[in-house]
Amino acid sequence: MRLKTLLTATALAAGVAVSAQAADLTVGFSQIGSESGWRAAETTVSKAEAKKRNVTLKIADAQQKQENQIKAIRSFIAQGVDAIFLAPVVATGWDSVLKEAKEAKIPVVLLDRDIDPSGKDLYLTAVTSDSVHEGKVAGDWLAKQVGGKPCNVVELQGTVGASVATNRKKGFDTAIASHPNIKLVRSQTGDFTRSKGKEVMESFIKAEGGGSSICAVYAHNDDMMIGAIQAMKEAGLKPGKDVLTVSIDAVPDIFKAMAAGEANATVELTPNMAGPALDAIIDYKANNKTPPKWIQTDSKLFTAADEPMKVYESKKDLGY
Ligand code: AHR
């Protein structure tokens, strides 16, 4: 039996709704990998949130490869887990394996990234932020900072094909579209990693004649921005002062960079996707309650004016 001990006899007799803590479920989590500080924190928080709710969480690290995620999902199905959490590395290519999960009557919850709308019927709910909005918040912040002045921007994109990379680009492009003084002059993937972010930024600086024409850097995550900051400093540029920076995640290191005057802004993404996902799955199993199709997490802008070292300290409880 998949759902082991959900209701006590007394609760059943009294018809009492089951609290989340009463669950004893096994959930398989196909995690992307550990490409960023945010991702590592998400894994840590997921373990803690599962423990709080007495849920056994089996995590499979896919090392950034979709084929490994597909294998992990098949293995979770074979093990007969109660539910599957999936952080999909890219948006396409899930239909077959998710159909297999559906046929096995195992609900799937998407964490932090989406899949193509064609797969909408193949998962129960998705716990994600509005990643188009995140890009828009970043673009609006930049537009406000530069006013009417000309500004050449370079962009470090996330993993090619990941919903969050597509959407964060879309949101940013929409925000700057009404500001002809802001020009996106270069845009390339840095695969959400610090090392790639640095490498790509070095190539941007070279291509832009040493980087003096670059007014701002937009990165789809903070880790790539930390790498880019390093590249700028090595090239003799002053990030946070001569070159504006705006990125996404709000990991502790970006607040350290802000406190040092080397970064300007970040849009927060909570690493706690598992908490709401677990609550939804427990309620679904115990009370047959279908969650909304999208459980949206907040996106908050932080700037260097927001006491970055205080925020840095407060982040310690969030799995970082
Ligand atoms: O899907 C969320 C993104 O994945 C985070 O913004 C990034 O850091 C991670 O790699």
Image (cartoon, rainbow, N blue to C red):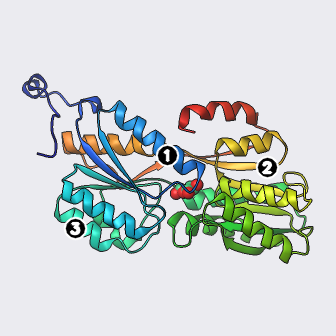
The residue under label 1 is 42
Residue nearest the observer in this picture, 193 or 141: 193
Let me know if residue 183 appears in the view: no
Which quarter of the image is occupied by the N terminus? top left
Are dots 2 and 3 in contact, CB under 8 Å?
A: no
Let me know if residue 3 appears in the view: yes
**Label 2 secondary element:** loop
Which comes sooner in the sequence, label 3 or label 1?
A: 1
Disc 3 residue type (three-letter): Glu
Residue nearest the observer in this picture, 100 or 185: 100
- Other-residue count near label 3 (Cα within 10 Å), few / some / many at <14 / 14–19 / ≥20: some
Q: Quadrant of ligand 1?
A: bottom right
| Ligand 1 is within 8 Å of the C-beta of the residue at disc 1 | yes
- Other-residue count near label 1 (Cα within 10 Å), few / some / many at <14 / 14–19 / ≥20: many
In this picture, is 38 found above or below 162? Answer: above
Which comes sooner in the sequence, label 2 or label 3?
A: 3
The residue under label 3 is 100
**Label 3 secondary element:** helix
Left or right of residue 62, residue 81 in this image: left
Which residue appears at 31% of the width and 73% of the height? 95
Disc 1 residue type (three-letter): Glu
In this picture, is 104 found above or below 6? Answer: below
The residue under label 2 is 263
Q: Whole-percent x and y of residue 277?
A: 37, 46
Residue nearest the observer in this picture, 51 or 161: 51
Disc 2 residue type (three-letter): Ala
